[in-house]
Amino acid sequence: MVVQRYLTKPYLIDGFKFDLRLYVLVNGISPLRVYLWNDGLARFATVPYETPNSKNMSNLFMHLTNYAINKDSEDFLQDENDESKGSKRSYTSVLKMMREAHGDASVDLM
């Protein structure tokens, strides 16, 4: 199942919109038992984000983070040597960047 919600003021990293793909296993309903994998993916748009308007609304590379779309962008960056750069990054590298920017307590609360 995909769970998502549109945010009108998204949190940006390096000026880019991104999404997180986290993997969970629901092992039971009553009682509810959910296991979260300790890593996942962060998928980035390939054009820096601007508030949507009539001129940029059709720029899929700016507003969507889907790999299937952004892999065709001339700005798609695949950096296999550094998981903290590129259009596809590890969840743990994003958390590390957020901890450096906002502190452990804020990221733990999130």
Image (spheres, rainbow, N blue to C red):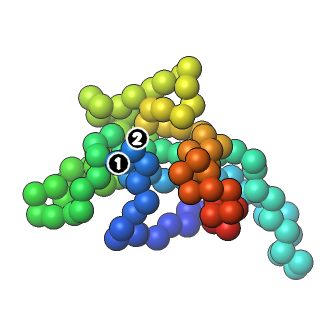
Q: Is residue 91 above or below residue 104?
A: above
Looking at this rendering, what residue extends furthest in the right direction? 31
Q: Which residue is mark 2?
A: 68
Q: Nearer the viewer, residue 58 or 38?
A: 38
Mark 1 or 2, which is nearer the eye? 1
- Within the image, what quadrant is residue 33 found in? bottom right
- Foreground pick, 13 / 90: 13
Q: Residue 67 location in percent, x, y?
A: 43, 41
Residue 15 badge = 1
Q: Quadrant of the C terminus?
A: bottom right
For numbered disc 2, what is the local secondary structure?
helix
Label 1: element kind: loop
Residue type highlighted by circle 2: Ala
Q: Residue at x 33, y 40 (%)?
A: 46
State the mark number for residue 109. Answer: none
Q: Residue at x 41, y 54 (%)?
A: 12
Q: Residue furthest left?
A: 55
Q: Quadrant of the N terminus?
A: bottom right
Q: Position of residue 88 (x, y in %)?
A: 49, 37
Residue at 39%, 44% in the rendered image? 14
Of mark 1 and mark 2, the one earlier in the sequence is: 1
